[in-house]
Amino acid sequence: QVQLVESGGGLVQAGGSLMLSCAASGRTLSTYAMAWFRQAPGKEREFVAVTRRNGGPTSYADSVKGRFAILRDNAKNAVYLQMNSLKLEDTAVYYCAATLSTYYYTRVSQYDSWGQGTQVTVSS
């Protein structure tokens, strides 16, 4: 397994931006599909974005498409989530996750490595 540590969460006003970082250790990230998920209070963890391994394409949840961007830096063994035009409903704990799987990227069950999460709070 790969060890993941998220950072960059915080409090931001609606319409603002944040960049989350996910630092990996123990394995080379290029061989993993890397994703961001989020979990709001009282709700299930949900898929946000994924960058497939070995230069594959990215995919996004409809709710964040056009506002969020997932970025991978294999040289730094890190993945980022640039979040723009934040909305109140983006408030959640955001998790970084890794998988060697090549399908069903939106499913929580496909990922066997998770970070501890970082809180993002969007205020009005």
Image (spheres, rainbow, N blue to C red):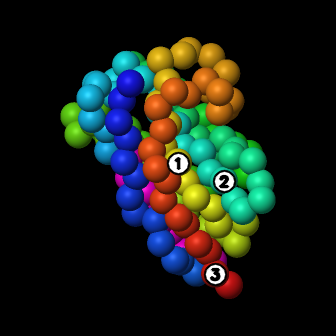
Discs 1/3, front? 1
Alpha carbon distance from label 1 to label 3: 20 Å
Task: List the single residue furthest toward the top.
Answer: 102
**What residue lies at 49% left-to-right and 53% top-to-bottom?**
117
Q: What residue is disc 2 on?
A: 39
Are the two marked residues, 1 and 3, in contact with CB atoms closer than 8 angstroms?
A: no
Task: List the single residue furthest toward the bottom.
Answer: 124
Is the residue 110 above or below the residue 122 in the image?
above
Residue 95: numbered disc:
1
- Residue 4 among magenta residues: no
Amino acid beneath label 3 = Ser
Label 3 sits on a secondary structure element that is: strand
Instruction: Magenta stretch: give its range.
Output: 14-22
Amino acid beneath label 1 = Tyr
Alpha carbon distance from label 1 to label 2: 8 Å
Q: Residue 62: x, y in percent? A: 74, 45
Which residue is nearer to you in this view: 85 or 99? 99
Mark yes or no: residue 123 visible: yes
Q: What residue is disc 3 on?
A: 123
**What residue lies at 48% left-to-right and 38% top-to-bottom?**
114
Alpha carbon distance from label 2 to label 3: 17 Å
